[in-house]
């Protein structure tokens, strides 16, 4: 599992993500289970899951090294937690989890 933290302006409700790699070097392909994006604005924190369950590898699966993933909005995969007042600051902290 790889985790990246990004400080950015608010991106609003995330519905899709595009992930890819350039395929450079031997063994550059990898299997992506899902991407989980957690972000906090004010006192509200959100988690959005983008399922993939596919290879990003030119020699595996369908040979693609780019995937457009759509948020799973069903069940508990997209949720709001730590409910409270929201002041919507200019800066939002995103935690991106790649489950491989």
Image (tube, rainbow, N blue to C red):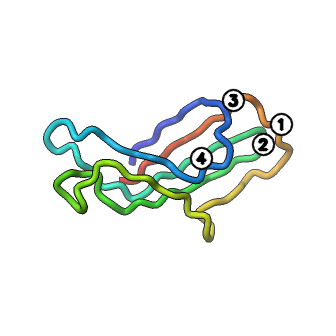
Instruction: Tell me what residue is drawn at x 16 percent, y 36 percent.
Output: 25
Crowd tier of the residue under label 4, counting other residues whose Cα lies within 10 Å: few below 14, some 14–19, many 20 or above? some
Residue 100 lies left or right of residue 36; in this view the side is left
* Secondary structure type for disc 4: strand
Estimate the spatial distance between the alpha carbons at disc 2 and disc 3, rounded to whole Å: 13 Å
* Secondary structure type for disc 1: loop
Residue 48 place in picture, x, y as percent: 59, 54
Q: Mark 1 or mark 2, which has the lower sequence index?
A: 2
Crowd tier of the residue under label 2, counting other residues whose Cα lies within 10 Å: few below 14, some 14–19, many 20 or above? few
Estimate the spatial distance between the alpha carbons at disc 4 and disc 1, rounded to whole Å: 18 Å
Instruction: Tell me what residue is drawn at x 49 percent, y 48 percent.
Output: 17
Q: Which residue is mark 1?
A: 87
Q: Nearer the viewer, residue 62 or 7?
A: 62
* Secondary structure type for disc 2: loop
Q: Which residue is mark 3?
A: 91
Q: Cβ–Cβ below 8 Å for labels 1 and 2?
A: yes
Q: Mark 2 or mark 4, which has the lower sequence index?
A: 4
Q: Which residue is mark 2?
A: 43
Q: Mark 3 or mark 4, which has the lower sequence index?
A: 4
From the viewer's perspective, is residue 25 above or below residue 53? above
Estimate the spatial distance between the alpha carbons at disc 3 and disc 1, rounded to whole Å: 11 Å
Residue furthest to the bottom in view is: 75
Estimate the spatial distance between the alpha carbons at disc 3 and disc 4, rounded to whole Å: 14 Å
């Amino acid at each position: 599992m790889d985790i990246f933290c990004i400080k950015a302006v608010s991106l609003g409700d995330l519905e899709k993500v595009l992930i890819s790699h350039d395929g450079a070097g031997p063994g550059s392909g990898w299997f992506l289970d899902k991407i989980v994006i957690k972000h906090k604005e004010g006192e509200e924190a959100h988690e959005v899951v983008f399922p993939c369950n596919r290879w990003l590898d030119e020699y595996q699966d369908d040979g693609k090294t780019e995937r457009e993933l759509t948020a799973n909005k069903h069940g508990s995969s997209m949720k709001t937690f730590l409910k409270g007042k929201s002041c919507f600051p200019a800066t939002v902290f995103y935690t991106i989890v790649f489950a491989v």
